[in-house]
Image: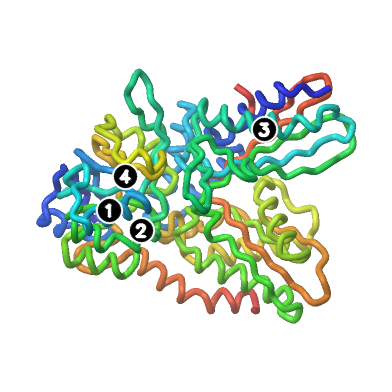
Amino acid sequence: MTVYKLRTPISEEDARKLKVNDTIYITGTIFTARDEAHHRALEFHKEGKEIPLDLQGLAVFHCGPIVKKKDDKWIIVAAGPTTSTRMDLFEDEFIRNFNVRVVIGKGGMGRKTTDAMKKYGAVYGAFTGGAAVLAAKAVKNVKSVEWHDLGMPEAMWVLNVEDFGPLTVAIDTYGNNLFEDIRKSVEETRQKIYEKLSV
Amino acid sequence: MVNEKTIEDVAVKLLQLAVTELPKDVKAALQRAYREEESDAGKTQLKAILDNVDLAEKTRTPMCQDTGIIIFYVKAGAQVENLGKIENALYRATIRATKEVPLRPNAVNPFTQKNSGDNTGRFLPFINWEVTSGDSVELTVFPKGGGSENVCALGMLRPGDGVKGLKKFVVDTLIKSGAKPCPPNILGVAVGGGADIVMKLAKKALLKPLDTPNPDPELAKLESELYEAANMTGIGPMGLGGTFTVLGVNVDYASRHPASYPVAVAFQCWAARRASARIHEDGKVEYLTHEAV
């Protein structure tokens, strides 16, 4: 297990150095995107329309933050990760089209995303679910908000962050998937638990 | 006469307390889990959770960005005047708390996908009413996050499956949920009644403090059996592997139809947010879960 401090834009080469169980901290630009922002970005791409920001080498954060406006400036109040599996629908295409290098969320992602990460060079960084104040603390300022019409949680919040983490690398570019490994070992205990409960 | 404005103010206060400060029993359970967790990954997660809880309390910031959909439980004394005004007061409190705390706007129309922006909408905030004797109002707020809600399960088992079937359903539901409900979780388990009754009981069981033993010895035994089984799975904090998959299991039941054996499992994430207060006829307010600041 190694600790890495990464700065955006992150290169494909740097992403390919990371292995599951490594810890990473990110400094630079990350942006939030949940179901709706993923959906819209892919629609725009299909129609050949420009999206508001170049995502190359950035980290996408599965998060619907609480944001407030103070003296005309946006302030991130709380910004923990949301469940990533919902984005399995979009993430392989999203990685392919926009070259993001880190996907931040909670709960891990599935086979399709894992394959895309291997192919295009990206990793999944697990952030503690609900640790919203810790996350907000690492946000230095809000650079912009895009697609605000999607509502506060679904909009794309572009954030300037410093040492954002700790993120546990749970999917790497070698096809390893930590959550999948845990799931397998949990599956192996199922029979033992049935026996203990005599069911 | 219980004043409408008092209800509104207390509800705003309870929402703020609930989302920024865990009840003592939950905090103690998380600290114990951190001390006793055997896996490194699990310990790292629990450390981040406890740091986050501290920071949230100190800065009066919501501990999780998902401040849930807003659910109220109201135990209203039958002799309270103005009962008809409570619903409006809670509606206004929700709008105010969304702005003042702040809470994330989480009320979305399921057809147009439009977010109302203030946590109100058709049937939201949701109010569970109970009429009791007396002249006070007991108000509980239960902001319920989506991640743990999405893995709640209803099983319409056969009566022949019985308690064994119930136990198996709980284990299967928990294993299927994996990392999704932000473990360590609290499980609310209920059996009997009908499809709606059983889920209501399971949800309500999530409000029971973790340090209060179940007064029914049979249920207490079942709770500890399920607790041990859950923590045998190895799912661990945030599903990254470890000892503490659950912090507690609370069981409740209702009598059932001879042909039905409904079982419900409700999940609460580690951010077990709840807060209660009693509002007396003379306007005195007693906070039951938190020290009001």
**Residue sitting at 64 percent across and 45 percent down?**
B123
Question: Left or right of B45: which side holds B224?
Answer: right
Tag 3–tag 1 contact (CB < 8 Å): no
Q: Are marks 4 and 2 on the same chain?
A: yes
Distance Cα–Cα, label 4 vs label 2: 12 Å
* CA gap, disc 4 and disc 3: 32 Å
Residue B90, labelled with which disc?
A: 3
What is the spatial separation of the Cα atoms under label 2 and label 1, in whole angstroms?
A: 10 Å
Which kind of residue does numbered mark 3 sit on? Leu
- Residue labelled with disc 1: A103
Q: Quadrant of residue B217?
A: bottom right
Circle nearer the viewer, 2 or 1: 2
Residue shown at 35% from the left, 28% from the top:
A75
Chain letter of disc 2?
Answer: A
Residue that lies at the very extreme toward the bottom in this rendered image: B160
Give x and y (percent) for residue B226: 63, 64
Local crowd at mark 1 within 10 Å, few (<14), some, or many (≥20)? Answer: many
Of mark 1 and mark 4, the one earlier in the sequence is: 4
Q: Nearer the viewer, residue A184 or B38?
A: A184
Residue A32: numbered disc: 4
Question: What residue does disc 2 label?
Answer: A87
**How many marks do you count on the picture?**
4
Relative side of B203 to A84, left or right: right
